[in-house]
Amino acid sequence: MPINFILVDTNIWHFTYVKPKEQDFVKIHDLATKFLSKVLSDNTIKITITNYQIAEIIELLRKNQVEVEKRRRLLNDFKKDKFLNKDFKEVADVENPLYPWILREGKKPIKIE
């Protein structure tokens, strides 16, 4: 069975692990959680990730007061075969699994109408 490799944006990890602070963003948190759950349970998909992104995710979750034990479990999960730790030299086509939401680093998500 062929393996597909994907990248998962840091914001998707954030929206999966952090509770929404505003009612307007409940839907985006739900979409992120469903997407990540599907990816994590699919044996034909491996998640590629860099050391930098792992640090970024753990730090983002720490800043949002996600429990230490939950962060520790996630860090251990990143060591499993589901993940391929790699440094990237080029960028592939990007697909937004949270459409119609657009995620922007350090800013509130926006919804395309």
Image: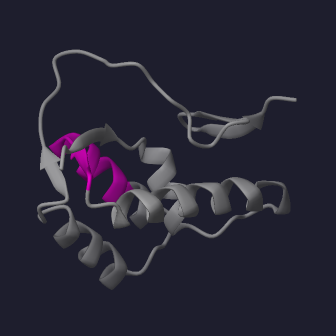
Residue placed most toward the observer, 82 or 90: 82
Q: How is the image coloured?
A: one colour
Q: Above or below — where is 100 with respect to 80?
A: above
Residue at the limit of the structure toward the bottom, as seen here = 69
Decide if residue 42 is on the left or right side of residue 46.
Answer: right
Residue at the limit of the structure toward the right, as seen here = 113
Question: Going 50% across and 67% down the picture, which residue do you hit?
Answer: 17
Question: Going 69% across and 53% down the picture, which residue do you hit?
Answer: 28
Q: Position of residue 77 (x, y in %)?
A: 21, 69
Q: What span is colored magenta in the figure?
A: 44-59
Q: Above or below — where is 100 with respect to 59?
A: above
Image quadrant where residue 71 sits: bottom left
Residue placed most toward the observer, 92 or 109: 92
Q: Is residue 55 magenta?
A: yes
Decide if residue 1 is on the left or right side of residue 22.
Answer: left
Image quadrant where residue 9 sits: top left
Q: Position of residue 54 (x, y in %)?
A: 25, 51
Residue at the limit of the structure toward the front, as seen here = 1
Q: Above or below — where is 98 with respect to 88?
A: below
Question: Going 26% across and 61% down the picture, which residue do you hit?
Answer: 43
Q: Above or below — where is 110 with respect to 26?
A: above
Q: Position of residue 33 (x, y in %)?
A: 55, 63
Image quadrant where residue 87 sits: top left
Question: Going 33% across and 39% down the picture, which residue do you hit?
Answer: 7
Residue placed most toward the observer, 101 or 95: 95
